[in-house]
Each structure stands twice: as structure tokens, then as C-alpha cells.
Image (tube, rainbow, N blue to C red):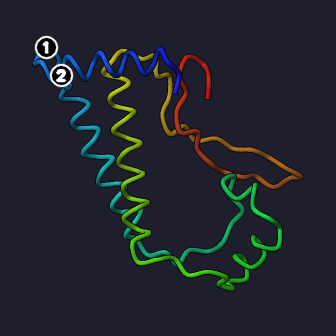
Amino acid sequence: MNNLIKEYLQLYLQKVVSGDAYISPDSISFFKDECAKALEKQFADKKKDWSMRMSGLGKPLCQQQLERDKIKTETMEYNAVNRFLFGDLLEVLLYIEMKEAGVNVEDYQKPVTLEIEGVKLKGTLDIIIDGKV
């Protein structure tokens, strides 16, 4: 994390602790909505049709082919859903804290598309700060 962003966050959180700063009602509402989305995402039916995704670009081709053909090569541990859920919640919490702290957050969870050989891959950029991904 950029040192300047870290300083903004520390200053903001110190102000919150001392009662000199609060979280906006809009941010609270946004957090509630994002929490609901995270729960739906992690506890939804996982039996979706396979498709190429940007997040899979770094995976070996053979692994992607096995996933496409619904051949399981590994079993997730029972607590994986909670780990993924905590990650989603932490991500939105940090976004809100940075925004409330005055960090120049330009975009969050921005949908993007990349075309390779006529195939469109969809994904999201987690966050854009000062023009940087």
C-alpha cells in the first residue's frame, strides 16, 4: 500500500477513534448493499456454466480445460466460503475507509472487457486510485 494512502487511512481512523470523524450515511448504505452482494455471491448456487474469465488468464491451459470439462482436481476446504466472504467484506471496508479518508478513489469494481483472438473476457478492476490500477 502506498505510504500516502496509509497515512490518510491512519489519520482518518485516529479521528474516528477520538470522535472527530464519522462514516457518512451513504457509505453505511453502500456497505450494507455490498455485504448483501457478498453473501449472495459466496452462498449462491456454484453450478454455473464454465466460461473463460480474466481471473483465469494466469492458470495453466490444462487446468482451465479440466475446469471446463467439470473434472475436479481439488476439493475446497469447508471454510473456503468464509475466507472468500471475509475477503469480499474486507475489500469493501477498505474502499469505504479510503474514500472517507479523502483518498482519490476514482473507481471501484469497474467492469472491463478484454478481447483476445475474437474471444471477449470479462472481469473487474478492483479499484482505481489516482489513475492507477
Image quadrant where residue 30 sits: top left
Residue 20 numbered tag: 1
| Residue closest to the far left | 19
Q: Going by the image, does 14 lie left or right of 72?
A: left
The secondary structure type at the circle numbered 1 is loop
Which residue shows up at 13% across the image and 13% down it?
20
Gap in angstroms between the C-alphas marked 1 and 2: 6 Å
Nearer the observer, 28 or 15: 15
Q: Amino acid at mark 2?
A: Val
Q: Position of residue 74 (x, y in %)?
A: 62, 80
Q: Position of residue 87 (x, y in %)?
A: 42, 52
Residue 1 numbered tag: none
Q: Position of residue 43 (x, y in %)?
A: 37, 70
Badge 2 is on which residue?
Answer: 16
Binning the other alpha carbons within 10 Å of mark 2 as few (below 14), some (14 to 19) or many (20 upward) gives few
Image quadrant where residue 93 sits: top left
Binning the other alpha carbons within 10 Å of mark 1 as few (below 14), some (14 to 19) or many (20 upward) gives few
| Residue closest to the far bottom | 71
The reply to whether callout 1 and callout 2 are in contact (CB within 8 Å) is yes
Which residue shows up at 83% across the image and 67% down it?
61
Q: Going by the image, does 57 lie left or right of 55?
A: right
Q: Amino acid at mark 1?
A: Asp
The answer to whether 105 is drawn above or below residue 88 in the figure is above
The answer to whether 9 is drawn above or below residue 46 in the figure is above
The quadrant of the rendering that contains the C terminus is top right
The secondary structure type at the circle numbered 2 is helix
